[in-house]
Amino acid sequence: MKSTILIQKSTHILLFAPLAFAAACNTSVNTVQTPSRGGANRIPVEKILFNPELSADLRVDDVREKMSGDHWTIQVNLTNVTGGDIEYQYRFEWLDPQGFLVDTPTSTWLPRKAHAGETLEITGVAPKPNIADFRLKLTNLDR
C-alpha cells in the first residue's frame, strides 16, 4: 500500500515539476509603451473618445500612426457592430508639446455613415510638424 502511494506521489511530482519550472521561468510584466514616430506603429485606444451611445455601436479594431517627413498620420479602423446603419461625426484634435489644443481649420466635425457590420477607416494628418499628441472624438450625428 505504501509503495502505491509513493508511486502515485512520484508520478504527480514528475508530471507537475516541469510545469512549475516553466511557470517560474516565465516572468511577464504589463507595460504600456509609447511608440516612436518612425514607421507605422500601434497606439493606445484611449485616445479615441466616444459619446456613451456611440461607444456601444462602434468597435475600435486598430489605431496606427506613421511619420512621413514632417507629417504625422493617424489611422483608426472601426467596425459597426449593430444590425443597422449608424450616422455619426468625428474630428481630430491636435495638441502641441505643452498639451494645448492647436486650433486648425481641419479640426471640424465631419459626418460619416457606417452600414451594418461595415469596417471603416478614419485617417487624420497633423496640420503642423510640432504636433505632439492627438485625440479623435466621435459622436452621434445631430439631425
Image (cartoon, helix red, strand yellow):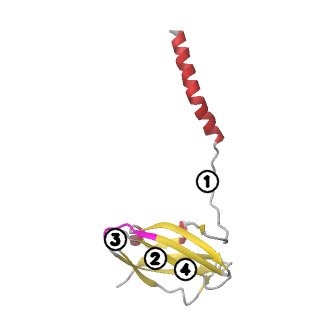
Residue under label 3: 116
Image coordinates of residue 59 in percent, x first then y, are 44, 67
Magenta highlight range: 78-83
Q: Is residue 92 left or right of residue 55?
A: right
Q: Of the residues shown, which amino acid type is indicated by label 1? A: Asn
Residue at 51% across, 67% down: 62
Q: In this rendered view, identify the residue nearer to me: 32 or 39.
A: 39
Residue under label 4: 124
Q: Residues within 10 Å of mark 1 (few under 14, many from 20)?
A: few
Image coordinates of residue 23 in percent, x first then y, are 60, 39
Secondary structure at numbered mark 1: loop
Q: CA distance from mark 4 to mark 3?
A: 24 Å
Residue at 45% across, 84% down: 110
Q: CA distance from mark 2 to mark 1?
A: 29 Å
Q: Of the residues shown, which amino acid type is indicated by label 3? A: Ala
Q: In this rendered view, identify the residue nearer to me: 104 or 60.
A: 60
Where is 114 relative to 44, above or below?
below
Q: First in sequence: mark 2 or mark 1?
A: 1
User: Is residue 82 a member of the stretch shown in magenta?
Assistant: yes
Q: Nearer the viewer, mark 2 or mark 3?
A: 3
Q: Of the residues shown, which amino acid type is indicated by label 2? A: Leu
Image coordinates of residue 91 in percent, x first then y, are 50, 81
How many numbered circles does the render carry? 4
Secondary structure at numbered mark 4: strand
Residue at 53% across, 85% down: 107
Q: Is residue 81 left or right of residue 40?
A: left
Q: First in sequence: mark 2 or mark 3?
A: 3
Quadrant location of the C terminus in the rendered image:
bottom left
